[in-house]
Image: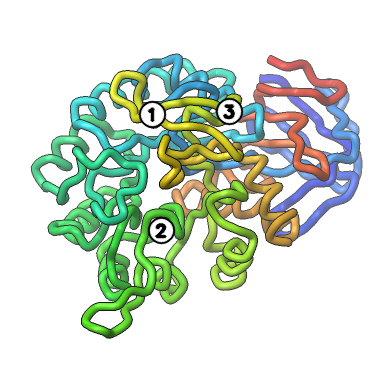
Amino acid sequence: MEKIKIINARILTPYRLIEKGCVLIKEGRIQKISTVDIDTGDYLVIDAGNKMLSPGFVDIHTHGGGGHDFMDATTEAYLGAARMHAVHGTTSLVATTLTSTIEELKNTFSVYKEAKTRNKDGAAFLGLHLEGPYFSMEQKGAQDPKYIKDPDREEYLKILGWSDDIIRWSAAPERKGALEFGREMQRRGILASVAHSDALCEEVEEAFENGFKLITHLYSSMSTVKRINAFRYAGVIESAFLIDEMFVEIIADGAHLPPSLLKLIYKVKGSGKIALVTDSMRGAGMPEGETLIGSLKNGQRAIIEDGVAKLPDRSVFAGSVATTDRLVRTMIRKAGVPVLEAVKMMTATPAVIMGLDNRIGSIVEDRDADIVVFDDDINVFMTMIKGNIVYNKLKGGQQK
């Protein structure tokens, strides 16, 4: 790998901004960070032009993009989506499935394994996230209802036996067998996450004790305050705020959540407990018009308009068409979050959630050289993955 020196950068470390900073990269890792230019000699020099340099964006919930969905179960779908997201600053992602048959899951597992070995110029694959099928029918959202069911131990153990790439699994904790499911995920080091759930707050608290440490796309497809026999009960949303240790992810595309809710979530949870996620479908990076949720073979029709995907009857959103740069931009412009904090929710915090913060998510010496350079409007000018420049509009570097 080349030795690279990036100069004249406003470097965003986990806790501070370094003006006119310099970063040295060697053998795919961050070698040194400096407040002054370092004389190196044989390094490829890239001038950041006083733009911001941050850790590469980490998207822990995406279904695809660029006209591809991971449920297509083709190598090109995985690689094409990864390339598209890299252009927008994503350096690593967790490929996410939809509620489907277990045969479809098995098929995409083998394709993922092949795509991982061939991925040279797209966002790195961190692992697989299974979204469903153990969901609430009342909060199914755009998930296909014909596959929704209770957790079945024999079934999910069979699925886990098919792949060692599964690193998170979203489920509704109130369903019969869900707590045992959560404990099994915890035993295996797989992140269990509350999603598409109609649970009461007390049920989420019990789920947290049994392995569920994250709320999937907060506010989307989940319960809030409800009346039962005239008495009010808190739901999943309220539990996310009440359980201090609970992580949350939010689709900060400016459509799924208004500025007021983005501000509320940030005020209560803080950047250390929030991960920004795209939850993007194949329509991310594509023009408005008709699209599909899920695979080309068995997917549901959807329409892209107003910067978001919707079911054809426009009754609910159907995932997003966001990219990670848009999420950071939205938090800064619409929620008034400082740049350092907005970037932290797109880098360090998702890395912590996935237990990968010793490798990615921060500009620190000896971490992977996953780097993105962008201007004040969060327009991406360069994306580097493990020292490999996969997208570049800056002077001095050559796109690989």
Q: As displayed, is residue 11 above or below residue 63? A: below
Viewer-nearest residue: 112 or 320:
320
Give left or right: position of 110 versus 48. left
State the residue position of label 1: 301
Determine the residue positioned at 16% across, 47% down: 149
Res. 347 in view: no
* Image coords of residue 194 (percent x, y): 34, 57
The numbered mark at residue 288 is 3
Residue type for callout 1: Arg
Specify which label sits upstream in the sequence, 1 or 3. Answer: 3
Q: As displayed, is residue 97 above or below residue 356? A: above
State the residue position of label 2: 215
Residue type for callout 2: Ile
Viewer-nearest residue: 303 or 332:
303
Q: How many marks?
A: 3
Mark 2 to mark 3 CA distance (whole Å):
29 Å
Res. 122 in view: yes
Give left or right: position of 256 versus 223. right
Q: How dense is the environment of label 1, judged by Cα within 10 Å: few (below 14), some, or many (20 and up)?
A: some
* Image coords of residue 166 (percent x, y): 32, 38
Q: Return the residue found at the far bottom.
A: 231
Q: As displayed, is residue 143 above or below residue 284? A: below
Q: Nearer the viewer, mark 2 or mark 3?
A: 3
Placement of the C terminus among the 4 image quadrants: top right
Determine the residue positioned at 67% across, 48% down: 328
Q: How dense is the environment of label 3, judged by Cα within 10 Å: few (below 14), some, or many (20 and up)?
A: some
Q: Secondary structure at mark 3?
A: loop
* Image coords of residue 349 (percent x, y): 55, 54
